Image: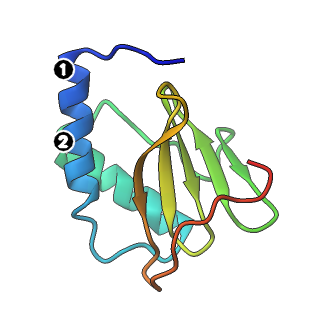
Amino acid sequence: MSVKRTDETKDRLGRLRTELGKLHPRPSSPEEARRGISCALENAGLCDWTVPELSGPDATWRADGSVVVKLLAHVIVFNASGAFRIVDSHSPQLPYFEMRAASGALFAMPAGL
């Protein structure tokens, strides 16, 4: 399902993408990736947007060490390596942002997702 976003939301998502692109060093674990995304949200002035803790009920750990977190309009998939992808739930499942791990490992979608 495609959703029409307001100009304000498009601007906010653009600012977040810019800040995500500045993450350095790249993450080496799902926890580091989550912290990096949280910092990017803050740097983009989006303190009212949050990423749930990976130990909470909103996070689903997979057998391969990946973690899936479902948000209102996005899903974040963290690989055990720290690589991650943010998928836009409303744009028929299009990637919004992707980052490789500190090791250089590319993001890999876990089996069964």
For the residues labelled 2 and 1, say whether their Cβ atoms are less than 8 Å apart. Answer: no
Residue 15, numbered label? 2
Q: In the image, residue 100 lies at what x, y percent? A: 44, 71
Residue 45, compared with residue 92, is above or below; it is below
* Residue at 51%, 73% in the rendered image: 106
Q: Residues within 10 Å of mark 2 (few under 14, many from 20)?
A: some
Q: Residues within 10 Å of mark 1 (few under 14, many from 20)?
A: few
Image quadrant where residue 70 sits: top right
Q: Amino acid at mark 1?
A: Glu
Relative to the observer, which residue lies in front, 55 or 106?
106
Q: In the image, residue 38 lies at what x, y percent? A: 35, 50
> Which mark is first along the chain, 1 or 2?
1
Q: Amino acid at mark 2?
A: Arg
Q: In the image, residue 101 lies at what x, y percent? A: 46, 75
Distance between the alpha carbons at the discs numbered 2 and 1: 11 Å
Total marks drawn? 2
Relative to the observer, which residue lies in front, 71 or 10?
10
* Residue at 52%, 42% in the rendered image: 52
* Residue at 82%, 63% in the rendered image: 63
Q: In the image, residue 80 lies at what x, y percent? A: 63, 71
- In the drawing, does residue 67 fall left or right of residue 47? right
Query: Which residue is denoted by mark 1 in the rendering?
Result: 8
